[in-house]
Image (spheres, rainbow, N blue to C red):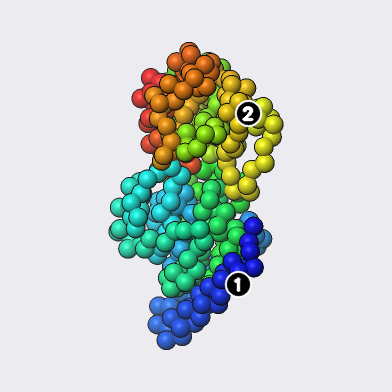
Amino acid sequence: MLTRSTGRVRAALAVLAVASIAALTGCGTSADEAKDTASGTREVATARGTVSVPSDPKRIVVLNGALAGYLYDLDAPVVAADPRLLGVATPKGEFPQVWAADAKEQGTQVVPTGEDINLEFVAAQRPDLIIGGGQGYPAQQTLNAYDQLSAIAPTALMPAGTTDWQEQLRYLADLVGRGDQVDGLLGNYRTKLAEVKSAIKIPAGNTTLVQSAKGDKPVVFVPSASLPKLLAEVGFALDTQVKAKAGNPEMPEAADYFSMSPELLNTVVDAPVTFVVTINGGRSLEQLRTDPLYAKLPSFTANTVYELPAISSRPDYRTVMSTLELLKDRFK
């Protein structure tokens, strides 16, 4: 819940952000900048309604690290990006290894992270497009700060319900005017998917995905999250009743998993197959095997429980391809 003082601070930062833009852009406009301005805009649907965005954005700030990889795959110009990926430990001031080389090549700046978005930093990048939304805590931050971000530059928030990575790719490609690249990327994926499906043997029975995180409460991915949907495309049968078994717990708007009481673990995670995704600070699969609550689960007793890296949690195009390779090696 926002306090009055927090609201005043955010409002003040928004004013500073807009003032920063005015100071930076009021010093003169180059011929290239004028040409870019004249290139036009397009209307796009976002989590906060229809937004007018540049037809060919030149200075993109992306405020959810889970979306940044797509932009690099689409050769979009990213001037600053949030470095956070779910469960991936990244040294302060650095980008996650999966797209760090792309960020270095483009000269992308690291967006400072904290309890609130650093609006002054965002404004100082002189963005012509801000991208946020999606899933997770960074997404929730952009939802909370949408009005302030919109005062800086056109802000497009991906709807939280757009969890399928292919839909995310199409959405972002359209958003940044790179729609012509989508067919090639999806073609590569379909080829890889067919290769993996023909090479592996899927364990019988339903599958549940567990996130091993800090804290005592077990965490389970909802079946509509990106990683479970990827496993379903490979051929795994998802347990679609996990949330109902947990009593339909409330979830934040941008969440793709839920937590529950430890007493519910054997009720919710009773599928014959389980995948464990260990994120930063969570227990590894081998450590979970020593926990009596987990050790008696059907998948643990049958040794049909498997581990995936944190980077697979919210896969984009490049991590989908690497996750498929992991599945091919694991289930050949």
Q: Is residue 45 visible?
A: no
Q: Residue at x 47, y 37 (%)?
A: 213
Q: Is 153 above or below relative to 257?
A: below
Residue of label 2 = 242
Q: Residue at x 67, y 41 (%)?
A: 250
Q: Residue at x 51, y 58 (%)?
A: 115
Q: In the drawing, does residue 155 fall left or right of residue 178? A: right
Q: Is 253 above or below relative to 271?
A: below
Q: Amino acid at mark 2?
A: Val
Q: Is 57 above or below relative to 283?
A: below
| Residue 118 placement (x, y as % from top left) | 47, 66
Q: Residues within 10 Å of mark 2 (few under 14, many from 20)?
A: many
Q: Is residue 201 visible?
A: yes
Q: Residue at x 64, y 43 (%)?
A: 251
Given the current orientation, which residue lies at the most extreme bottom position? Answer: 27
Q: Amino acid at mark 1?
A: Arg
Q: CA distance from mark 2 to mark 1?
A: 41 Å
| Residue 148 placement (x, y as % from top left) | 58, 69
Q: In the drawing, does residue 123 fall left or right of residue 15? A: left
Disc 2 or 1, which lies upstream in sequence?
Answer: 1
